[in-house]
Amino acid sequence: METDALTIALTIAIAIVLALSSVTHIRNEGETVIHRSKTVPHGILLTKRPSEKVKTLYDVWQTGAAVNPTGRSFMFMLQNQFAFVEATYEQINMRISGFGTGFVKVTGLKPKTDTPVGIFMPYSQESFVAQQAFYRYSFVAVPIHDLRSNDLLVEVVDQTKLKAIIVSQKVLPLLLQSLKECPTIKTIIMAGIYISPEQLELAAQHGVRLLKFAAVEYEGSWSPMAPVQPDPEDVAMINYNTKSTSLSKGVMLTHANLIAAMTAFTEALPATKRFTSKDRLLSHFSNGDVISVFLSSAIILAGGSLVFPSGLMKNVLHDSQASAPTIFASTPIILEKIHEALQLTYGQGSMFKRGFAAKLALLQAGRVTTTSLWDLIGLGEVRSKLGGKVRMVVTTHPTKPETLDYIRAAMGIHVIATYGRTETSGIVTARNMLDYTSVPHLGPPVGCNEVKLVDDVTAGYTSADEPSPRGEILIRGPNVMKGYYKKPSATSVAIDEHGWFHSGELGTFHANGTLEVLGKKKKTKSAAGAASA
């Protein structure tokens, strides 16, 4: 019997996914078996770090900076201009050291004291320098993002008792208006070019020093302090998810947590697709998205380049064309907007329709390519809209399947989609980038954690369900958070005595060991009360 190309391709894809999943057949009543990555079968320790030399985010920087210290490795937008400037690892290293030293001098805060410091600004060169400085001198970063009102800002400051905060020029007015409700803040460092006399006076009325980022950096550049290195179990960041209308609990993530996530993400990539010193990452994830931390850490460890985009939705394509990244990391909504925009511009032409149909057929047969005839005569311009050099798109759950197919077929770019929670350092599973099927799964567990499902009576999901078990998703591993900041009761509800984090999300395991998310678990009144404690 003759087998068609599509059947062969699907068989290969399923075999690849199966090869990346490992399960134990031992399970408890009301639970599924425990699933792991094939790279760390049961009896082997879960992935923690890339090497014995890299245990903290400070180690990541030191290792990556040594790969190509004089190479042009950082690109960022000039103030309000459509142009990128470049800097080397050596130059950025001096800025990190200068700002960190200056920060200690002007604030009087002592390193290695678990002191939280706010970062209330978009992903940018300044926010990057600040975070790296905090890793170097063992402070705790508190990224504040996507705020819809000053009430949420005040709540973050109140919970963490922030004494110092770094802000962008755009959000400075909001913070100044909130100083009455934020009495713990004593120093504001503004990343921008202008502070008005009125703003200085308003800050002074509340006993707050208002300084420019550049001035703090300059202050510390004269006599840089020696690093005060963190330990792996030290908290690197406290993350608040402020995308909803109410503030969530602060998630404490240690250096060890984030190193485990970075390492597992890298190992989930095919060996020939992993980041190298020739790669350039453009990411649209914010400071508060943990995926931003492990992606930037992975590219730094390889000695690659980082691009700090303008942060404006209308400039997404321009930023990519101007910086020519090889790795493009974006949220589902941004990718879907790009898809819509390109489809509106090119999708109505007969040549594009014929070319896309032909390349979609190639995709379904197991091929992602940029060298077909259609790439030469019709689709090359579409690919160029991301700069022409992108070889990999990294995104998260849930991204529309038609958008993923468009990126793979029309643009000839591989996609890796991940699933994770803030509490798990941003990653739990990763879909194999060579799996082009339309099955709505999110891949098998990555190497830093193991996953199981537990029966959920309210939803009617059980481990005995056919054809696939269903239940609440539980995760355990070195990527799971230290706990919720100053909320021991909520921590004990979320993480049980065996170290399993109860995600509050429902899922199912397919026969090949890949996970599909089905939705959120309904909270009972008792659980909700305990979680808020």
Image (cartoon, rainbow, N blue to C red):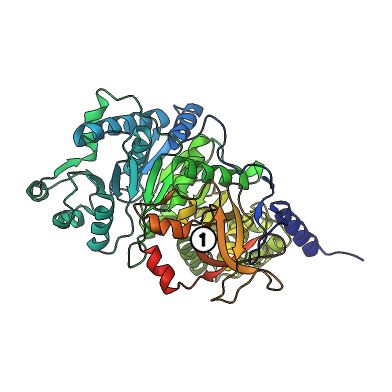
**In screen coordinates, is 22 left or right of 61?**
right
Q: Nearer the viewer, residue 102 or 375?
A: 102
- At horizontal 44% and vertical 46% (from top left) the residue drawn is 293
- Point out the image quarter for the N terminus: bottom right
Which residue occupies the extreme top position in the image? 223
**In the picture provided, is 150 more to the left or to the right than 525?**
left
**Furthest-right residue in this view:** 1
Q: Is residue 390 left or right of residue 149?
A: right
- Quarter location, residue 418: bottom right
Residue 283 visible in this rendered orientation of the protein: no
* Quadrant location, the C terminus: bottom left
Closest to the observer, 203 or 141: 141
Near-viewer residue (238 or 77): 238
The amino acid beneath tag 1 is His
Find residue 65 and report its horizontal and vertical position in percent.
46, 30
Tally of marks = 1
Image check: 140 left or right of 443?
left
Quarter of image, res 431 = bottom right
Q: Which residue is pictured at 74% across the width and 59% down the height? A: 14
Q: Is residue 285 above or below residue 464?
A: above
* Number of residues whose C-alpha sits closer than 10 Å to that of mark 1, classed few (under 14), some (14–19) or many (20 or more): some
- Pointer 1 residue: 502
Looking at the picture, how far across and down is residue 93, in whole percent?
37, 30
Q: Is residue 313 visible?
A: yes
Q: Residue at x 25, y 53 (%)?
A: 157
The percent position of residue 98, horizontal first and vertical second, equals 29, 30
Element marked by disc 1: strand
Q: Residue at x 40, y 63 (%)?
A: 531
Residue 161 locus on image (x, y percent): 24, 49
Q: Residue 324 or 381: which is nearer the viewer?
A: 324
